[in-house]
Amino acid sequence: MKKITIIISVLALTGVSLAVESAKLSVAEIVNKANIAAYYQGKDAKARVHMDIIGDNGSRKVRDFIILRKTIVDGGDQKFYVYFNSPADIRRMVFMVHKHVGEGNQDDRWLYLPSLDLVNRIAAGDKRTSFVGSDYFYEDVSGRDLSEDTHELVGETDKYYIIRNTPKKPDEVEFNYYDLSIDKKTFLPIKIFFYDKSNILYRKIEVLKVAIIQGHPTAIDILVTNLAAKSKTRMVFTGVKYDIGLPDIFTERYLRVAPRKYLR
Amino acid sequence: MKLFNKDIDRRLVEYSVAHHKKITLVMLIATVILACFIPKVQVDTDPENMLSSDEPVRVYHHKMKKEFTIYDLVVLGIVNETNPHGVYNPETLKKVYDLTQFVKTLNWKENGEEVGVVGPEVMAPSEVDHVSNLGMGTISFEWLVKTPPKTQKEADEFKIKAKSNPLLLDTVFSRDDKAVAIYIPLTSKDVGYRVYKQINKYIKEHYSGSQEKFYLSGLPVAEDTFGVEMFLQMVISAPMAMLVVFLLMLAFFRKIILVISPMIVAIISIICTMGLLIAFGYSIHIMTSMIPIFLMPIAVVDSVHILSEFFDRYTPERGRRAVIIEVMHELFVPMLYTSLTSAAGFASLALTPIPPVQIFGLFVAVGIMIAWICTVTFVPAYVMMISEKSLANFGNSTGKISRESPMARSLHWLGRFVFKHAKSVIVASVLISIISVIGITKIHVNDNPVRWFTLRHPIRIADIELNKHFGGTYMSYLVLDQKQDDTDLVSYAQNLSKDFDAQIPKWKEQGYANVDKVASQMKELFLKLSKTAKSKSELLNAVFDEAYERSFNADSGDEVETWDVVGEYFGLKDEALKQFKQPENLRYISKLQKYLLDSGLVGKSNSLSDIVKKIYQELIDGKQSNYRIPDSSRAVAQCLMQYQSGHKPYDLWHFVTNDFRHANIWLQLKSGDNKDMKKVIAVVNEFIKKNPIPNNLELHWAGLTYINVVWQEKMVFGMLQSFMGSFLVVFVMMVLLFRSVGWGLLCMTPLTITILLIYGATGFVGKDYDMPTAVLSSLTLGMAVDFAIHFIQRVRATHVGNSSWRGTNKIMFGEPARAISRNVIVIAVGFLPLLAAGLVPYKTVGIMLCCIMALSGSITLVLLPAMIKVWRSRLFCECKSVRCASCSFIMCSVVSVSMLIIVVLCVEQYIKSGLSELLMIAGATGLVLLIASYLFTRRKRCRDLQELKESDGV
């Protein structure tokens, strides 16, 4: 039975890639497919993440968390639940996002701090702040809304489409534009290079390893480099599972009482 | 004890006279070769290098800088005193914003490495987060300035936000609303001047004539700018001094062609010395940059003596050859000794524990000896190259010029005065010395690189202005370190497992599933790992991680929770080891900060505690009452996790290391004076006395302001030590030269009184005892003894054939006194141009040199004849003759004990501990030496000599 699924999914994949080869895709199509590949695989998903933050002076910090994701509308609204396990003194801390897609729509974000027994809403606004001290941004966790940038195809290699994304509201972000290298076969963004206001590369996100899980090509090893601060963050995903049948645990109630069942 | 063959001087001079062209050529070639090294010069203006690079305080400072990613900071202040809203108006804020953006771009590549401003670490309104509680449990993180306010209303709103953050108040924003500061971190101090220049250029180009004032200050800028201006001073001051010396000599000797010779000697010795210094691979430091200025007077002095004598004796009938040979013969020994003593004075600086001062001392000593060689070979050779014709009308050839000159007349009057009032002169000198000693006790040791600039210098003005508005531009870091934990891991594990066992019933009671199974597995693992783990932290973390791992294979959902709680037990034990997550330690830091602020010595301080308090306040409700440290270490950790969710998560690591074992309190001081830094250290010590430091913590200092204090303390003690050493060396040399303890002591008197007077006056005037002041003591020693040597040598030569002191006195106040006076005037006045320098250390050297020369010259001329008159019967006593010198018990013992003390002073430096042991050994050795001296002077030869003398007497 298992074998069959694998064969089917492999076939499906090659089918997809063949289809791509045959037809010339528009920029919007590429961008949409990339968005789906990166954030919308499966109806829901679960992964265990090990995060390693390496500072300029060689210092290392570790974070361990479990991330749950549920798609409400394909390519549209989603919910995220991030439960921290390590270090021990932030265990049970939870970060939750209700992602609302579309121009003018703001995400809702919450943070639960167990030691203060405090649920805080994080004010809408800047999402390009550090995610728990790493080089990741909050926005990278849930994905940047496609409607916030204009997209153009600036290059194409054997393996990648290169899409340049320019913000519609440049004052809101610290970058001038960013280039996505999208894998032609899987449509996973493999490299994201950010350029600052003087068009100098200052930040990059690279996928170091992709695995096919339940038929979905999934980035399982990602490195973010902050070239300006000379800091790096590596995230390794294990135990990735799609379609686990998550109920609606994305409410304030579950911040205080974690849904244990879904966290292993 | 004969240092030189009697004929050697005559032969040397005759050789120089005969082969004057060869001598000149050799000298020229040597100079040119050494001059070739000069373009390879490397500059080092870092006062930090006053300490050797392996000095513990420096090593620690650099370790801390790396651990906390701290950079040396330049402060750019923007002040608006005219606008009623102060800096909080759209125009000024736009400028602040634009300047910040500009400053961030100031970096470039040097040897493949990026240097300049560390862009991401710039601290400015647009580079910091604004954290606030918006009510209804909503917290907001945003840039304090995303785009500069466009209207006054926006600027007013911005003001409220800006001033709400205690971390920024007094640091970025002034309390009086009139100033805002940008903190500019540099990759290293030596880019300070370039950054300084570029920012100033930008301001000039964009904002000239604007209502704001812009100020740039901070130690890195001061130190690097000093280096640049130092070279300017070297290029301007040294030649200026040379010119004045030249003009003065011309006025005395009137023959330009003759006066050029001392200038050539000075230039050759300066070029050779600097060439050698650079050839040996040393960089030019603030100290070594002064070598030319120190060398010049010393190099000129001997030639002035020669010229002076030559001038007074030359007649066309005798011819230049005979006169120069005579003069050289007479001056050879005093010149050799004056050079040796000056060289010894400077060489003794090698005893100080400060590398640049050591190099300075040694190379000045080398330069002095080069100057001596030049003087004894080149000057006679040079005289020979002048034709007799051009010497017509020179010097005494017309007979009476000098005798009638005002100088000659006043010197004769002085001679008569001293002869008449010898005793009063001595009494007056003693009184002056006593008063001087009182002055010396008032000296305060202090230094501050910013004060090396005069009050009108932009850096000094900026320093004053910025420190008026902000917490301070001088940075100092107080670091609390967790002590090394050296408890045995196995026994620690056994103790902890007992505590762990005690938890088991509690967990069961709370209803966790399969507690026994999970607990026994974890305990077994814990005890097993305790045998191999390297630290408690590693051990606890390993167990914590493994529990998490195993929880994924738990039998049931309920068991997962058991794994979690058991794992957490170990994880939290590890967190408890991290001292700076503990509320009590953070409160201790806050208390210390408050104590420092209340003392008025620290303008502002920032620490981990401030961050935790601010985040806690905003997390809870934003109310002032919640601006406090939360009660548990987990709450602290979670506050910090929140802080790291801002735009600049790395900022946290400036205040604590990521293992939370080291915390850093950033102190801003309004004054960089070492004496003020020392007061801060004293206040911290006072605080610790009242509030004992938690017993697993230790406190250390870092930061440039602190480092300056450390080397200064070394300098003061080191200089004193080296001064004592050189004083004794010179004393021993004098005793040997004159073969008499009495004459030796006499010779040391003028320099002793000069030094007492100079430093006494320094104390009374209130001038800080800083680096240049300290180093000048060696110069004083070398110069002041020179005059005494010349004087005494002439007295002893003259008095042999002249039994009445009145006659000798009269002769002494003729030609010899004139030579000394000319020297005094040439050098004292010659260095007054240094007063025009824009850098304070150069001014200090100028004034002090002038005073030293004037004082030592006049003390020699007034006090020595007076003392000789009073004690002449003892001084001219027969038994002090050459042959029985080694038979004098007093002389033997004085010399040997002095040498012993010199050795002790040298050795002391290399013995870190056991000073009392050293003193005991020295005491014993001293006793042995005394006995040895006694036996030595009672040996047969001496007894024979004694008998011989007695029978002669009969």
Image (tube, coloured by chain):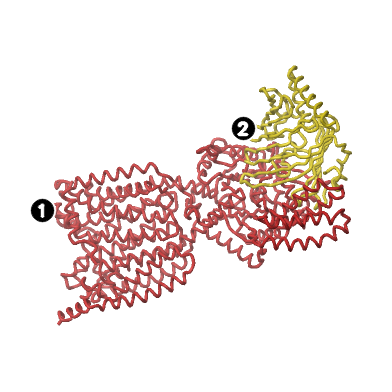
Residue at screen point 87% across, 47% down: B557
Residue at screen point 19% across, 58% down: B8
Residue B625's quadrant in the figure?
bottom right
For this view, does B768 lie left or right of residue A4?
left
Residue B528's quadrant in the figure?
bottom right
Residue type at mark 2 is Ile
Q: Chain A in the picture: what colour? A: yellow
Residue holding disc 1: B317
**x%, y% of residue B545?**
74, 49
**x%, y% of residue B62?**
56, 51
**x%, y% of residue B287?**
42, 53
Residue situated in front as seen by the camera: B823 or B419: B823
**Chain at tag 1:** B
**x%, y% of residue B425?**
31, 71
Residue type at mark 1 is Glu
* Structural distance between the alpha carbons of marks 1 and 2: 85 Å
Residue situated in front as seen by the camera: B65 or B562: B562
Q: Report if the CB atoms under discs 1 and 2 are less than 8 Å apart.
A: no
Chain identifier, red in the render: B
Give the numbered dot on residue A200.
2
The secondary element bearing badge 1 is classed as loop
Residue furthest toward the bottom?
B954
**Chain at tag 2:** A
Give the numbered dot on residue A68.
none
Residue at screen point 15% across, 46% down: B387
With respect to residue A39, does B13 lie above or below?
below
Residue B540 visible = yes
